[in-house]
Amino acid sequence: MLDLFSDEAPWAEPLADGAVILRRRARQQGEALLTSIAQIAEQNPFQHRITPGGYRMSVAMTNCGDLGWSSDSRGYQYTEADNLSGHRWPAMPQPFRLLAQTAAQEAGFAGFQPDACLINRYEPGAKLSLHQDKDEKDLHQPIVSVSLGLPAVFQFGGFARGDGVQRVLLEHGDVVVWGGPSRLRFHGILPVKPGVHPLAGPYRYNLTFRRAR
Ligand code: MD3
Ligand code: FE
């Protein structure tokens, strides 16, 4: 439940070696972040990409920053332009960069300089199957994720696809920093349940800040 009058301080929940949830860390900025996301999507609309295996992703994606992540029949890659529109990705807004850097620092990763921000949009039923993020050049760099809008159950596995998973609810304003040995763990999102969030409507959004090169 969103409480517009709550000024509860964020709190940290260690999840695994190198991974920490900064609960509600971005909540006060939620509305501003959503406004920026809408502006970015006006320039480069959310798209359902096709995986190299030929499946349409249920998650819709766009990016901001020097580099953006996308998928097509040739594979997954970071590019300087949206291969669908041909346009460069919109610049990473300064408040996005500051949030990612300070959250990384709070989790023990000083000096994080993200050059890519993938923006995922989940409609009800959308999910992300278990996967690893390893398209980035330096896997010693953490990833910072920011969840906005509808809640979702995050699955956090091990280093092999078949390892058991922890299930963690991620809610509006939660920031998670994934680094160290956690950086290569399998993870995913279970199908998002239908709902209406007071600021985000029928969607869940997730920002992931990365150092891609
Ligand atoms: C754990 N996104 O975009 S964020 C992704 O909520 C992705 O949209 C999910 O997985 C989402 O690749 C989960 C949490 C996350 C992001 C990157 C990670 C967890 C991670 C990288 C390594 C380990
Ligand atoms: Fe991922």
Image (cartoon, helix red, strand yellow):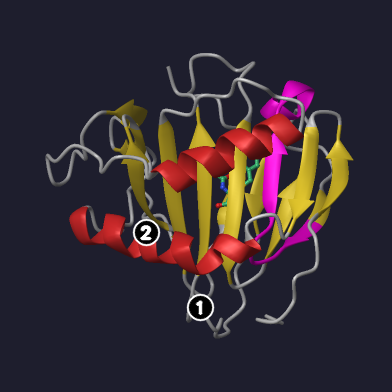
Q: How many marks?
A: 2
Residue 88, horizontal then vertical, whole percent: 19, 37
Q: Can the viewer see residue 35 in this picture?
A: yes
- Image disc number at residue 199: 1
The residues bearing labels 1 and 2 have C-alpha atoms spaced at a distance of 13 Å
To which quarter of the image does residue 212 belong?
A: top left
Report the amino acid beneath label 1: Leu
Q: Nearer the viewer, residue 61 or 131?
A: 61
Q: Nearer the viewer, residue 177 or 3?
A: 3
When the figure is inspected, residue 201 is found, relative to residue 41, above or below; the finding is below
Residue 62, horizontal then vertical, whole percent: 34, 50
Apparent side of residue 94 relative to residue 141 in the rendered image (left or right): left
Apparent side of residue 108 relative to residue 143 in the rendered image (left or right): right
Secondary structure of the residue carrying numbered label 1: loop
Q: Nearer the viewer, residue 101 or 170?
A: 101
Residue 23, horizontal then vertical, whole percent: 77, 56
Question: Which residue is located at x 69 percent, y 38 percent?
Answer: 177
Question: Which residue is located at x 62 percent, y 77 percent?
Answer: 193
When the figure is inspected, residue 39 is found, relative to residue 110, above or below; the finding is below
- Image disc number at residue 36: 2
Instruction: Classify mark 1 as within 8 Å of ligand 1 or not, answering yes or no.
Output: no
Q: Which residues are magenta?
A: 168-184
